[in-house]
Amino acid sequence: MTEGMPSEPADLVDAFYARFVRPLGNLVILFAQAEAAWLTLLVDLTGCTEKEAQKFLQKEAADVKQEILPLVRASAIEGYARQELCDSIDKFLCDRKRRNRLIHDEWYVSLFEPGGVAMTRGLPRKKDADVAYGDSTPEDVWNLAWRFREYAHVFSHASHMLGEQKSQ
């Protein structure tokens, strides 16, 4: 450590959660980057403003796919790039739900497992919905973060391709 530099504070979470600190931190940053690339892509595909594109974030995944995938198929993006984009949109919308569970649900330790296991519990927002329980491992969170990194690349590349098309 450099003299005069404050030391980095220790993690504030209980020891049960310490294994999740780095993967969740990476998930937060990579999701934000993927979501920014997703918004840019929505603007490029629809011609709407960024503020209007943000409304897509509040829609159900099925509604977004129903509106966006036909625009992708009608765009100049062809072949493998179009298939990869369609697949990535579908998977991104599913993974976004998983990310929301990890970020917004309550974290607790289940003592029913030997040594205790970090778990999540999400209270239902919809009437008659069940409580959602999760038992992700740090490796699961790393994999999810990695996928958001890949989505950001795919969405950015598609936006670039659409920009190139418009400039020609």
Image (cartoon, rainbow, N blue to C red):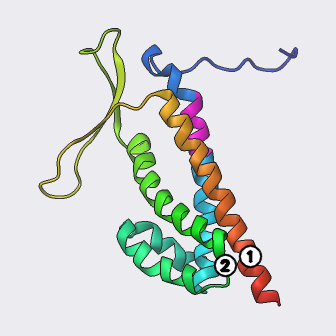
Total of numbered circles in the picture? 2
Q: Which quarter of the figure is the C terminus placed in?
A: bottom right
Asked if residue 48 can be seen in this view, the reply is: no
Q: Which residue is mark 1?
A: 161
Residue shown at 62% from the left, 85% from the top: 75
User: Residue 113's quadrant in the figure?
Assistant: top left
Asked if residue 38 can be seen in this view, the reply is: yes
Residue 9 in the magenta stretch? The answer is no
Give percent across and percent down for residue 119: 34, 28
Q: Which quarter of the figure is the N terminus placed in?
A: top right
Q: Which residues are magenta?
A: 22-29
Residue shown at 42% from the left, 40% from the top: 102
Quick one: label 2 or label 1, which is nearer the N terminus? 2
Disc 1, SS: helix
Residue type at the position of mark 2: Ile
Residue type at the position of mark 1: Met
Give percent across and percent down for residue 167: 82, 88
CB under 8 Å between discs 2 and 1:
yes
Label of residue 77 in the image: 2
